[in-house]
Amino acid sequence: MVEKANLVEVFGSIQGEGLYLGERQLFVRFAGCNLRCKFCDTANALEAPAQFKWGMGNGEWGMADNPVSVSQLVEIIKEFGASYHSISLTGGEPLLQADFIKELLTPYPLPLTPYLETNGTLPQEFKKIVDKVNIISMDIKLPSSTGLKGYWQEYEEFLRLAKGKEIFVKLVVTSETIEEDVKKAYSLVAKVNPAIPIILQPASNSLPSFKSLLYYQSLSSHLKVRIIPQVHKLMNWR
């Protein structure tokens, strides 16, 4: 079966958050998300447009129809060349289209390292591609930050599936985040693998106080917790 996917955009830029901050990446942004977080900063990716755009970062964009086939996407990606650290599969939530990603990466015809950015709530979909991706950026969506329920069981299952992979966890912290949620996230990571790095990421549209961030960081002395803002938002990059 030939898989097809709905995209929002394909573009080259600089990774603006997490442990790979500053690396040059090619971004493939998938359309659609299973969550509706209060702090969402990619609302344009929640629904599939009739067409997606792709561009080299020079202000000029091409347009292509949704849904797109794997072969069509590969041809677009090849236009960007190989001068990127990795290819970010992001969204929205890319694991909603895991079958397409599996086909894209089997066999993988591109010279760029596969880098998955996910909300971590779809472990059964992640299982389909866990052996295909090299780097994983997984969010733990704190209920007090998102306004949604907690997905603690899904996060634990996801992290266990990622055993042996390069993975880091992001906690988006807002002005409404509560201490109990941060502690629960720390406890979950420590239970699965305390070596997994954790990023406290202040939400760009609901900034917590610096004092709060320092306090949340201090809640664990045995985990690798860093505070890293969304630099692409501060610099007004794509």
Image: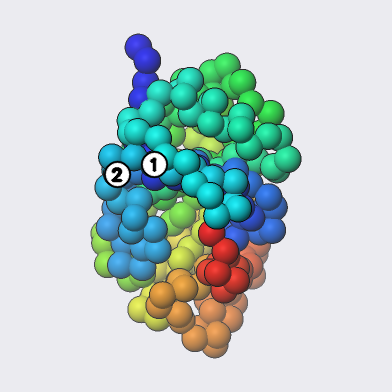
Q: Is residue 202 above or below residue 193?
A: below
Q: Identify the residue position indicated by label 2 in the image.
A: 49
Residue 119, how many percent across, how many down?
41, 50
What secondary structure is found at the residue carrying circle 1?
strand
Please say if the residues under marks 1 and 2 sit with CB atoms less than 8 Å apart: yes
| Front residue (pair 56, 160) | 56
Q: Percent x, y for residue 193?
A: 58, 48
Residue positioned 53% across, 26% down in the render: 74
In front here: 238 or 35? 238
* 44 lies left or right of 214: left
- Nearer the observer, 144 or 89: 89
Which residue in the structure is indicated by mark 1? 52
Q: Is residue 211 visible?
A: yes
* Residue placed most toward the observer, 58 or 187: 58
Compared with 21, 159 (above or below) is above
Label 2: element kind: loop
The type of residue carrying mark 2 is: Pro
Instruction: Point out residue 20 in the picture as x, y percentages from the top left corner.
Output: 66, 54
At 73% from the left and 40% from the top, the residue drawn is 83
Which quadrant, please, contains the N terminus?
top left
- Label 1 environment density (alpha carbons within 10 Å; few <14, some 14–19, many ≥20): many
Residue sitting farthest toward the top? 1
Q: Residue furthest right?
A: 83
